[in-house]
Image (spheres, rainbow, N blue to C red):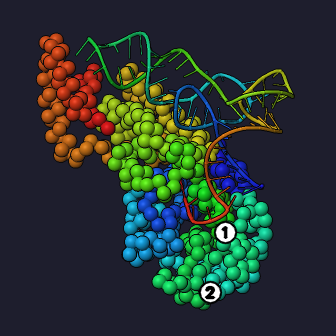
Amino acid sequence: MALSLYDTSARTQREFVSIEPGKTGIYLCGATVQAPPHVGHIRSGVAFDVLRRWLIARGYDVTFIRNVTDIDDKIINNGKAQAIPYWLVAMNNERAFTDAYNVLGCLPPTYEPRATGHITEMVTIMQRLIEAGHAYQLNGDVYFDVKSFTKYGNLSGQKPDDMVSSADSEAMGKRDPRDFAMWKSVKPGEPSWPTPFGDGRPGWHIECSAMAHKYLGANFDIHGGGLDLIFPHHENEIAQSQAAGDGFANYWMHNAWVTTAGEKMSKSLGNSLLVSEVVKRIRPVDLRYYLVSVHYRSMLEYSDASVQEAGQAFRRIEGFIARAQEFLGAQAATVEELRPQQFDDAMDDDLSVAQGCAVIHETIRAGNAALTAQNSSDVAAAYGAVLGMLDVLGLHPRDWPKSTGGDDQTTEVIDGLVHALLEQRQDARARKDFEAADAIRDGLDAMGIRIEDTPQGARWTLEQ
RNA sequence: GGUGGGUUGGCCGAGAGGCGAGGCAAGGGACUGCAAAUCCCUCUACACCGGUUCAAAUCCGGUACCCACCUCCA
């Protein structure tokens, strides 16, 4: 089965064929760094991280560009409100985004360009557009002439004439209310850059056209982002880039958003859903498993309870891995990570991760049974398969240090103490003093240390 | 007004004409001194009304409710 991906512009799934065999370029609209990220923002990062990992698994050399838009109205206004420069607002939030991507195990992008570093490239595009008659200057602003681009509205399926005009569309002198500003003339107290059109700053949209061109070329494979970017952001990017003569993106992919209480998660919801906060009450790996296990185009109704339930399922996976490692011993390190065909087929089908997870769980059931039967070749096969699949989802245990709550040294000390107690308990059990044995177990349990008896002796784990 | 999406069992979530994904929870069983873990079994579904078909959760028509985009948004 060949990889096929849902292409928003085609409104259907299409077989993925890269421009250059064995290589592919992805441009992901990253953050407009006006506030720290909440769970919804990071879903996008995680979804496209899985896409990237899958392309890598399929043998592609992936160039992954994720931009940072570090200049816009809100960033400037937030700076004014906090009495700090706009660039500090941008920097602080960019760091918060980086932390969030890292804590959730997203691979760092190949390159992460910032809008303000690409004014020159923006000017070039705008000049090309003006020369081609697709843009015009007006009072120091530069507008894109929507009517001059007949394909305007194709991506979002909007007919320009049916669109509700924005409130300020009666604005002075624009040729059409839908014409959008690529360049905004300088206002007092606001940052600006000198250009042939006068001092000013970029509008929204133009930075992505400029940066995608610079790092991926005039024509590249995949452009991604959240559903809500389809219009106007991506529609406008297409208009700018294609009117300027670029082929631009061959595939458009959009992730659905995260909702809370049935509504889209927005920046006004307060702090409790900031990634930095959520991660204090939920293991990051559980959050990643939760975000990853739902198809990227399905809406995700967020609640802590749902994540915890997902975490329960993930713990089953972790439990198997731990037991398999214990059982296999040194052999574990040499097991080949071979993914089941069913899993690959699911991923090839527009990244059907939910089905992939079903394969993981089925493999684990077989692995657990093999463990009970002490069948080491079957255990090894299941273990390798599970690791291979987890790797594609960015959930490989090697990337997630065990959260035992301490460093190795502390863990060693705890291990020693727990084992001393377990020996006492074993003595009590041997003389059938179950009351004493259970008292030890209950005592450990109260401290968050879970005891499981196995044929090889008792095993302890920290409650998570 | 225009456009797009959704409604699946106690819950989370796949699927997209015919063998009931998977997980969580629940109940029963095996194992265990007991527990835990594990395995086996069981239960509960496709918003509503019509239609097409030998066969519909899946296709067609309609209804209801929900959400989003068209203004900043992952």
Q: Quadrant of residue A126?
A: bottom right
Q: Which mark is residue A439?
A: none
Residue neighbourhood size for the residue with mark 2, other residues' Cα within 10 Å, grouped as few (<14), some (14–19), many (≥20): some
Q: CA distance from mark 1 to mark 2?
A: 22 Å
Which residue is found at the position 67% from the left and 67% from the top? A166
Residue A316, percent across and down?
40, 32
The residue to which callout 2 is attached is A140
Side (left or right) of A329 relative to A418: right
Q: Which residue shows up at 35% across the image and 45% down it?
A: A281
Q: Residue at x 52, y 72 (%)?
A: A73
Q: Residue A225's image quarter?
A: bottom right
Residue A353 in the image: above or below residue A119: above
Chain under numbered label 2? A
Amino acid carrying label 1: it is Ala
Mark 2 element type: loop
* Left or right for A343, reference B47: left
Q: Which tag is nearer the camera, tag 1 or tag 2?
A: 1
Residues A433 and A172: in front is A172
Q: Tell me if residue B25 comes above or below residue A17 in the rendering.
A: above
Q: Nearer the viewer, residue A222 or A120?
A: A120
| Spot occupied by residue A393 in the image (x, y as percentages of width and height) | 48, 46
Chain ID of residue with mark 1: A
Numbered disc 1: secondary structure? helix
Q: Is residue A242 in view?
A: no
> In the rendered view of the protein, which quadrant contains the N terminus of chain A?
top right
The image quadrant that residue A424 belongs to is: top left
Which amino acid type is marked by label 2? Answer: Gly
> Label 1: which residue?
A167
Classify mark 1: residues with Cα within 10 Å, few (<14), some (14-19) or many (20+): few
